Amino acid sequence: MARDHVAGVVDRILYGRVDLARAAAGQPMVMELELIEPSLYLMRHPRPRDRFVAAICRALAAHHR
């Protein structure tokens, strides 16, 4: 279900999060869809930070081709 909500943009975003909750009847529903996170804790974890920076560099390079 979460993939359905980002399917059209998944190849163009560097970060995305879909929070799901269960409705009263039990079916899953989207509670929150984030395409930006103000605090990714990148300064605390060097490896994810480096991967994220590399992804940004690749995206910028592809955009300027």
Image (tube, grey):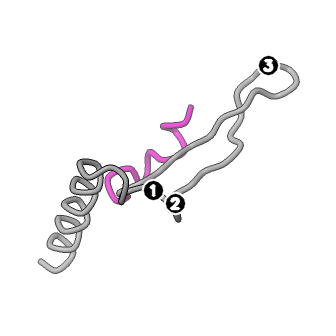
Residue 37 circle label = 2
Type of residue at label 3?
Gly
Q: Which residues are magenta?
A: 1-13
Please state which of residues 21 and 46 is positioned toward the viewer in this rendering: 46
* CA separation in Å, label 1 and label 2: 6 Å
**Residue 34, percent from left and from top:** 56, 55
Q: Secondary structure at mark 2?
A: loop
Badge 3 is on which residue? 26
Badge 1 is on which residue? 40
**Residue 63, percent from left and from top:** 21, 75
Q: Secondary structure at mark 3?
A: loop
Q: Residue at x 23, y 66 (%)?
A: 59
Tell me if label 1 and label 2 are in contact, CB under 8 Å. yes
Q: Secondary structure at mark 1?
A: loop
Within 10 Å of the Cα at label 3, are there few (<14), some (14-19), or many (20+) other Cα atoms?
few
Q: Residue at x 44, y 45 (%)?
A: 7
**Which mark is first along the chain, 3 or 1?**
3
**Residue 35, percent from left and from top:** 50, 58
Q: Residue at x 82, y 28 (%)?
A: 23
In the image, which is nearer the foreground, mark 1 or mark 3?
1
In the image, which is nearer the foreground, mark 3 or mark 2?
2
**Does residue 7 show up magenta in the picture?**
yes
Name the outermost residue toward the bottom: 64
Which image quadrant: the N terminus? top right
Within 10 Å of the Cα at label 1, are there few (<14), some (14-19), or many (20+) other Cα atoms?
few
